[in-house]
Amino acid sequence: MPSFSQPPVFIAFTGVDRADLIPEMQTLSSAYPIEWGLLIDPDRPADHLFADERLVDASRTAGGLRLAAHVCGALAREIVADPLTARFDPTGFQRVQVNHSFEGSSPAAIAATRLYGRRVGVRAVLQTKDVFPAEEGVDWLYDVSFGVGVRPSTWPALPDSGPFCGFSGGLGPATVEGALTAIAAPVGAIYWIDMESQIRTDGLLDLDKCRAVCRAVYGERG
């Protein structure tokens, strides 16, 4: 039996890096509640962590996948600068995480991200390094790691009501059960968890590690 009482409503595996994984991603998604995150920044074509246009198109037309776009760089800054003209097309994605800054979001950036999500018809996500903000209209991800596997010493409490919130930071097959125990989400709480660095082998997304995380959180399925 797991040592935590309330599992997340889904697990976000971030950093899909090649199209030949899609059939196995579909199989895993048929057994477990998963969101697959694609890192997107056209200014970083040489970085394999970031999905190119072919991978983006293959993912969002595959079917059977819940997808999130983790928009970075200039594309993300465009959203918070002018959400009415931002050029990122979220077709095929259920959520867009706007990674516009490592320093948090100003009230203006939050309002712009909220407006962008409403304009294009997706749930928008922002990151926080502190307690979960009360501002609604965006989802909030607690993240002190920013993809480098740093585990926080403490986890913020989930709000009793308000925005949809999630946790990230050093989560993977070896750490997820202990982290969920420390998070201590109350029974009935609705939240998600996100991970990137600890589900990779030699820098590449490892679906065996993703499957191990699913089993640790939800038990054996499929």
Image (cartoon, grey):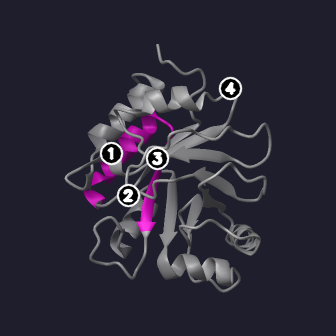
Distance, label 1 to label 3, CA atoms, is 12 Å
Q: Callout 3: helix, strand or loop?
A: loop
Horizontal side of residue 9 vs 110, given as left or right: left
Q: Are marks 4 and 2 in contact (CB under 8 Å)?
A: no
| Residue with the mark numbered 2 | 15
Was residue 110 drawn as part of the magenta stretch in this picture? Answer: no
Q: Earlier in the sequence, mark 1 or mark 3?
A: 3
Horizontal side of residue 165 vs 147, given as left or right: right
In front of the other: label 3 or label 4? 3
Q: Which residues are magenta?
A: 19-39
Horizontal side of residue 156 vs 33, given as left or right: right
Q: Are marks 3 and 4 in contact (CB under 8 Å)?
A: no
Pinpoint residue 55: horizontal percent, then vertical percent.
Answer: 35, 67
Amino acid type for the residue under numbered disc 4: Pro
From this viewpoint, which residue is outermost toward the front? 153
Distance, label 4 to label 2, CA atoms, is 29 Å
Q: Callout 2: helix, strand or loop?
A: loop
Which quadrant: the C terminus? top left
Q: Earlier in the sequence, mark 1 or mark 4?
A: 4
| Residue with the mark numbered 1 | 199
Distance, label 3 to label 4, CA atoms, is 20 Å
| Residue with the mark numbered 4 | 186
| Residue with the mark numbered 3 | 169
The answer to whether residue 132 of the structure is visible from this angle is: yes
Horizontal side of residue 83 vs 160, given as left or right: left
Our reading of the magenta stretch's main secondary structure is helix
Amino acid type for the residue under numbered disc 1: Ile
Pinpoint residue 57: horizontal percent, then vertical percent.
Answer: 41, 69
Q: Earlier in the sequence, mark 2 or mark 3?
A: 2
Amino acid type for the residue under numbered disc 3: Gly
Q: Earlier in the sequence, mark 3 or mark 4?
A: 3
